[in-house]
Amino acid sequence: MTDLLDLLSAGRGGTVWPLFVHAHPDDETLQSGLLIAWLAARQVACDVVTCTRGEQGEVVDGVLPPTITPDDLVRVRMRELTGALDKLGVAGRFMLGTPPARAGGLEARHYHDSGMRWVAPGLAGPADVDDPLAFTAAPLEEAVDDLLALIAETQPSVLVGYDRHGSYGHPDHRRAHEVAVAAARSSGVPMIEVASAEDAEGFEWFDLSAQLPVVIDALRCHATQLTVVDGDHIVHVGGQRQELPRKVGLRPLGDEN
């Protein structure tokens, strides 16, 4: 294996404990499910911290009753997240703002999904949502301190997160990237970025297609957000059809061209 996968699967001093930083329930599977499943198959324990509960997510028609409340949706999405993490083999599961992923002395905080709107095909931008509890409305330093508290508690060997494009540009993805980068630099824990675009330059690409069946099982847990079709495609809640990726692109933080 290459140095990058060695870092993830061998760690420092033989201690392995990757911490994946994600914005919403389902991102852990969509953005890094192949990698998490690959690590789990090698008996590498992974942690996932999710920054929001996906309050602004739309719902696939017919999956939930039309009378469902926002609080009901959050409860459903958290159950979906638990199911997907179980399928992927994730060890530790945390919510940013909730102890131990909360800076000492502060009351627990729920960072809300900031929402998004499509600004171009495949590219998201900020939504017209006025929510002081939104993840992007919170001070960056507060969210970074929360992640640093979790790092101090769990002692990960490496952080894994989005690149600066935040996969498809969702404001919460971009903020999660900023938080992870700042926490990595402050703590000294190395960070690996996951490529947003397939075959993006500057990344090392790995074929992890053997893990696709596990990822599909995990994706089926997120029934409010997507539908698996034809065994190798998904249809998102917004109607976009996507072929499931079989490769993952990785690079160490700071290796941007």
Image (tube, rainbow, N blue to C red):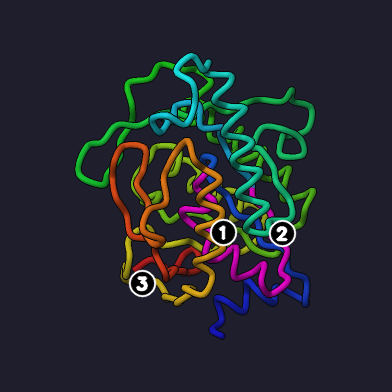
Using the image, tell me which numbered label, if any, was put on residue 16: none
Amino acid on which the number 1 mark rests in the picture? Val
Using the image, tell me which numbered label, if any, was put on residue 202: 3
Q: Which residue is mark 2?
A: 156
User: Contact, CB < 8 Å: mark 2 with mark 3?
Assistant: no
3D distance between C-alphas at marks 2 and 3: 25 Å
Q: Residue at x 57, y 28 (%)?
A: 111
Amino acid on which the number 3 mark rests in the picture? Gly
Q: Which sits earlier in the primary sequence, circle 1 or circle 3?
A: 1
Q: Where are the magenta residues, as a range?
A: 26-48
Q: Dividing the image into 4 quarters, which one contains the N terminus?
A: bottom right
Neighbourhood count class around disc 1 (C-alpha, 10 Å): few under 14, some 14–19, many 20 upward: many
Q: Tag 2, which secondary structure?
A: loop
Query: Is 185 left or right of 60, judged from the image as shown?
Result: right
Q: Which sits earlier in the primary sequence, circle 2 or circle 3?
A: 2
Amino acid on which the number 2 mark rests in the picture? Pro
Q: Is residue 110 magenta?
A: no
So how many labels did they put on this image?
A: 3
Q: Residue at x 78, y 33 (%)?
A: 104
Using the image, tell me which numbered label, if any, was put on residue 160: 1
Q: Tag 3, which secondary structure?
A: loop
Instruction: Residue 177: give x, y in percent of width and height.
Output: 48, 48
Residue 146, relative to residue 193: is it above or below? Answer: above
Comparing 194 with 86, the one in front is 86
